[in-house]
Image: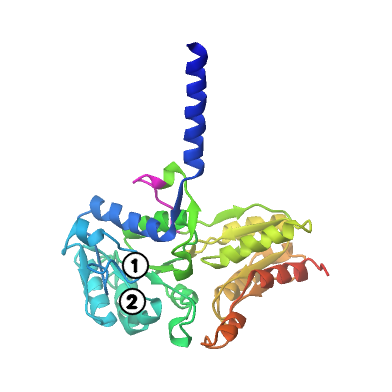
Amino acid sequence: MALRKCGNLFVARLAGNSSRAASTMTVRDALNQAMDEEIKRDDRVFLLGEEVAQYDGAYKISKGLWKKHGDKRIIDTPITEMGFAGIAVGAAFAGLRPICEFMTFNFSMQAIDQIINSAAKTYYMSAGRVPVPIVFRGPNGAAAGVAAQHSQDYSAWYAHCPGLKVVTPYSAEDAKGLLKASIRDDNPVVFLENEILYGQSFPVSDEVLSDDFVVPIGKAKIERSGDHVTIVSYSRGVEFSLEAAKQLESIGVSAEVINLRSLRPFDFESIRQSVHKTHHLISVETGWPFAGIGAEIAAQVMESDVFDQLDSPLLRVTGVDVPMPYAHTLEQAALPTTEHVVKAVKKSLNIQ
């Protein structure tokens, strides 16, 4: 009997470990879960945007939320970004906590006056009397086959503006924890998702699945430790960076990969500590090179003690400095790849 109990206990433990190891979540489900939990937690939180309610969202991020929370919390809007962004900002002025979804951040251009002049500046212009707790969220950057007007990366655009917080999740853990933190924040947050990442699954711990899980805004994550070179990226660029690090391992190169998670506030300290160890630095982004995030990293390196730690110049991996082509082959040529990251690391380390 004792032997049988021991055997059953062993099998149960194996099953439990297997369940934990196999626990995965897509970025889409992580975003959905974050909004669901925060809407239940706080009566002031609501979601509005085009097709977010009865259609479950253009990318199904809000799937099931309308049926669960009703018309007052999940609100379909007309096709007028300037209009519904203005309504959302006004609601934030009045003490509510709106989540304003853009079907794509390319369409946020229609609402940029509301985002910058109304949301980002009001707390300052009111001498701290009027906080603006709002989240602007939706897919950002290149998807596939949607050409120049639907492929722009707004990371550097919005990170340029004081008064905004800018968040760029990569994994399901990032997506859930950072969105919950953004909704609870008293500042306007631009939450830049990536359409290609929506359907990707990532391992998640029991902690991530809990209602209380929050990732602090402004703190980067070391996705992979290394000793020879630091690769800094965000959003989908982290995927290319991790794939590159895996390839480089086969030739004896140990790459440290930093997922910035937030662009404003910006965790330069994590970069500084890493470069003090590796003495080589590569930045990776899918947006344009001119005045991009990599350019800002380079400037901060030059203006700090990190510059003295470099054994070779910082190198940037970026998108090509052209509007996104529609032709598939040209689109591929306009975007950075894992191979570009590997090539940059080899150049930095003087590996032929």
Q: Which residue is found at the position 66% from the left and 71% from the top?
A: 302
Q: Position of residue 281 (x, y in %)?
A: 68, 65
Would residue 91 be found to the left or right of residue 109 on screen? left
For the residues marked 1 and 2, what is the alpha-carbon distance in whole angstroms?
A: 8 Å
Query: Would residue 213 be counted in the magenta stretch?
Result: yes
Query: Would residue 48 be counted in the magenta stretch?
Result: no
Please tell me which of labels 1 and 2 falls first in the chain: 2
Q: Position of residue 255 (x, y in %)?
A: 69, 58
Q: 44 or 188: which is nearer to us?
A: 44
Q: Which residue is found at the position 36% from the left and 69% from the top?
A: 59
Magenta region, residue range:
209-217
* Amino acid type, label 1: Pro
**Circle 2 SS class:** helix
Residue 264 appears anywhere in the view: no
**Circle 1 SS class:** loop
Q: Residue furthest right?
A: 352
Q: Which residue is found at the position 25% from the left and 82% from the top?
A: 80
Which residue is the site of mark 2? 115
Which residue is the site of mark 1? 188
Q: Which residue is found at the position 67% from the left and 63% from the top?
A: 244
Residue 112 sits above or below residue 18 on the image: below
Residue 215 sits above or below residue 164 on the image: above
Callout 1 touching callout 2 (CB < 8 Å): yes
